[in-house]
Amino acid sequence: MIDVCAQEKKQMSSITAALARIASAIESVTETESVTLKNALGRVLAVPIYSAINSPFDRNSAMDGYAFSSTDLILGQVITLTQVGISWAGQPYQGPLKAGQCIRIFTGAVMPAEADSIVMQEQVQVKASSITLPAHTKGQEHVRAVGEDITQGALVCAAFKKISAIDLGLLASVGIDSLVVKRKVKIAFFSTGNELTALGQALESGKIYDSNRYLLTGLLTDACYQVTDLGVIADDPQQLEDCIVAAAKNHDLIISTGGASVGEADYIKEVLARCGKVDFWKIAIKPGKPLAFGKIKDCHFFGLPGNPVAVVVTFQHIVAPALEQLSGVPMSQPLQVLAKCTTALKKAPGRQEYQRGILSQDDNGELLVAALPQQGSNILKAASLANCYIVLPIECSGLQAGETVRIELIKSVVSSVISH
């Protein structure tokens, strides 16, 4: 089996080499802005955040139960204490706690200074104000120490961290109500092609609906991005140049789909060379070989292929890491794990392939993956069904069923991995 598209006179760039060149060409946006904590989800922190307080602020109970001093315990003996008060969350017990005494306490409530232990309410016997602890009661349990989570002055979130939902809770727990974040990356995108038809219009012979702009709309949905859809640009060099030059004036990055190949009506490389700079335009991956990367003054440019699955693959593996770096997050690569492939795989050497697959897990915990039957770069249905990529290296010439392969999870795949 021969990969005809890999038979190039000039050696194509590997994805690793392409990413290295992109990394060296892109610098993070430098401007910042202040946002409230409620509006910080998904934004990139510009400066580190340190805590002004201890968290927890007070010693408090991790359980509903009874607080007492471990000095009252006698090894192996049942102990009866006298309840003298209650400590509620937000309303601490105010009196002293003497030997032989305890208080009722609820989760999160402040511990009396004299107490160092909690016994769970399910483990005691209660008769009026007499609280009997079982012989196996242990001291110094179920108490949260001051600063157990975060100590005063400690780093809470490092700079260039993308704020998650958990980070919102973490920052709120130490009283942070506003953050300094990187400004949003300004992105413009458009499709090219005289064959493209807008949704809502009747489809004529030789025409196709423009799916790529909807793909990119979803892929670019991110709190770090300010996105402009420039629509469909005809296969006309002057129109393309006018569009790109205008968009470059007020955007950080432009993405096009289509027109990056070698057909007579594929003008992206030609236009980009005339109004900017082209760094490379063929990468040894499948799907997605024709890909332009360049710059128009201070604006970066990615020219993606026209086939929709190639758009997805090249965006996720090349454009997304570049956007991370541009937005201030260190460039990363997707996590890959090993799985047993239950289907035979066809492949010719020459390009790294990202075949669409279904990942599952058997009763013994072994990961299994099956390739979807249709792997064409126009087959969106298979891409929709897939929950992983089967990553086949450049030199691979196919695999037999039962062999181990590298797989790469797509999106939030954990919830879609099912046991048989």
Image (spheres, rainbow, N blue to C red):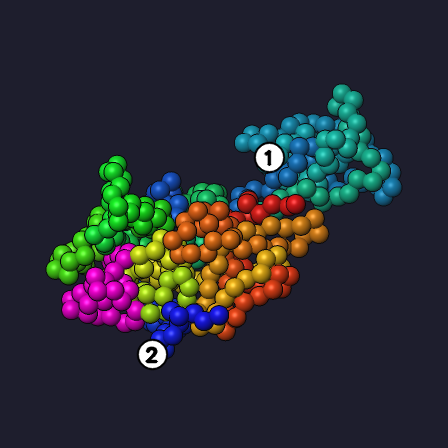
Residue 3: % across, % down: 43, 69
Dot 1: element: loop
The residue that disc 1 covers is 109
Left or right of 372 on screen, residue 418? right
**Label 2 sits on what residue type?**
Lys
Look at the image and tell me whether residue 225 can be seen.
yes
Residue 218: % across, % down: 36, 46
Query: Is residue 128 depicted above or below 418 in this figure?
Result: above
Given the current orientation, which residue lies at the most extreme top position? 128
Given the current orientation, which residue lies at the most extreme front position? 205
Left or right of 335 on screen, residue 186? left
Q: Nearer the viewer, residue 6 or 366?
A: 6
Q: Nearer the viewer, residue 99 or 159?
A: 159
Please report the bounds of the magenta region as a residue range: 252-281
Q: Nearer the viewer, residue 38 or 310?
A: 310
The residue that disc 2 covers is 9
Q: How far is the residue under mark 1 from the one under mark 2?
A: 73 Å
Binning the other alpha carbons within 10 Å of mark 1 as few (below 14), some (14 to 19) or many (20 upward) gives many
Mark closest to the chain's N terminus, 1 or 2: 2
Marks 1,2: beta carbons within 8 A: no
**Label 1 sits on what residue type?**
Ala
Q: Nearer the viewer, mark 1 or mark 2?
A: 2
Q: Is residue 270 magenta?
A: yes
How many tags in the picture?
2
Residue 94: % across, % down: 60, 31
- Residue 406, quarter of the rendered image: bottom right
Quadrant for the C terminus, please: top right
- Residue 295, quarter of the rendered image: bottom left
